[in-house]
Amino acid sequence: MAFLDIRKLRKTYGTAVALDGIDLSVKEGEFVTLLGPSGSGKTTLLMSIAGFTRPEEGGIVVDGRDITDMDPEDRDFGLVFQGYALFPHLSVADNIAFPLKVRKWEKARITARVEEMLTLVGLEDYASRKPRQLSGGQQQRVAIARALSYGPRILLLDEPLSALDRNLRESMQRELKRLHQETGVTFIFVTHDQEEAYAMSDRIAVFQSGRIVQVGEPREIYTHPKSLFVAGFLGGNNIFKASYSLADETISFFGSTYPAPPHFDASLAGKDGEIIGWIRPEDISISDGDGDGIRFEARVIDISFAGAAEKLAVIAPDGQEVGLTLPMEATRDLKRGATVTCLVKPQNLGFLAPET
């Protein structure tokens, strides 16, 4: 049996369905991320696990015990909010000690535990400071230390990195991974940021309109999306229309016809052979005549600098727009309006049925 087992969870707000029959199992010690756009249900599920939201249907079981109707304080889970929710009048040490005092720990035990948590998050020299005297990243560390101080079996994190700048966010991603590995606590993390989910998670549950549409390891979801939504939401994949001909086993897209790749599943084809294709921007290169693969001519309509790479937007002969991510040296002499030959390896093409 899974450590955390969520079955058929449903929650509505009037006519709006926030959770539509959610099923999710989490192993003890896993780092699972709930990923999806705003309003997709991920925070509602997190608050249901915490006990602040009560579902109308379904159940939540932790280590064999049904906690669906249990009060939040009795679940004894740690919770880190987006805004950290630190007490501004208390020092760092007193913020961490607060949940221990509520649980009536002995004073000596509290002191030892606070010192342990300060060391864990690298804030030994900040114990007497107030939250206003800390950076955003330091405040977040205090919030995490407080949530972990009493030894919760599950730590729930509601978009705690969203207010941080890019460099600090990446640093805190590494910090969270370290804390997860060192403590062994089960982490349930909510975000709408795909890169954040890829960087930290053991598994990702992708949300769409109150449902989980795919669960898997980051690499699995990235390379094998099971629906049009997942293919488009994760990784910024190019989604394009294509058609399959059973008579000669060819696929037509971007204004040309090509032999169907060996991995293509003909059962995906819908009415009149319609299919949906996807390709990652980094899997398309500009050809100078060398290299095997699928080629198509395209007109450059935009070039954007993106640090170590350049992002190109091109128009294929059939009018479909395609995005490319290329190293800077590959785009040095390109201008808007130029015609380029794009090259794709057949094995990097993905296909979905039209109804997905």
Image (cartoon, rainbow, N blue to C red):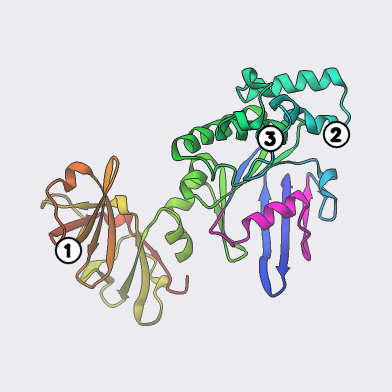
Query: Which residue, given by chain and number where applicable, does mark 2 sit on?
Result: 102
Q: Secondary structure at mark 1?
A: strand
Magenta run includes residue 54: yes
**Magenta-drawn stretch contains 56:** yes
Q: Amino acid at mark 1?
A: Arg
- Do the CB atoms of the residues marked 3 and 2 lie less than 8 Å apart? no
Q: Residue at x 42, y 61 (%)?
A: 232
Question: Which corner quadrant of the image does residue 110 belong to?
Answer: top right
Residue 87 coordinates in the image, percent (x, y): 72, 36
Alpha-carbon span between mark 3 and mark 2: 21 Å
Q: Nearer the viewer, residue 141 or 333?
A: 141
Element carrying mark 2: helix
Q: In this picture, which residue range is highlighted in magenta?
A: 35-62
- What separation in Å lies between label 3 and label 1 (alpha carbons)? 51 Å
Q: Mark 2 or mark 1, which is nearer the start of the sequence?
A: 2
- Nearer the observer, disc 3 or disc 2? 2
- Where residue 94 appears, as percent x and y from the top left, is 75, 27
Q: Earlier in the sequence, mark 3 or mark 2?
A: 2
Q: Is residue 296 visible?
A: no
Task: Say which residue label 1 marks.
Answer: 299
Where is residue 160? Give x, y as percent: 59, 43
For label 3, the residue is: 185
Does residue 139 sit above or below 231 in this rendering?
above
Q: Is residue 98 left or right of residue 323?
A: right
Which residue shows up at 62% across the image and 22% down it?
Answer: 123
Label 3 crowding class (10 Å Cα cut-off): few <14, some 14-19, many 20+?
many
Nearer the observer: mark 3 or 1; the answer is 1
The crowding category of the residue bearing disc 1, from other C-alpha atoms within 10 Å (few below 14, some 14 to 19, many at least 20), is: many
Sequence-wise, the earlier of marks 3 and 1 is 3
Q: Marks 1 and 3: in contact by CB < 8 Å?
A: no
Between residues 304 and 343, which one lies in front from this camera angle?
A: 304
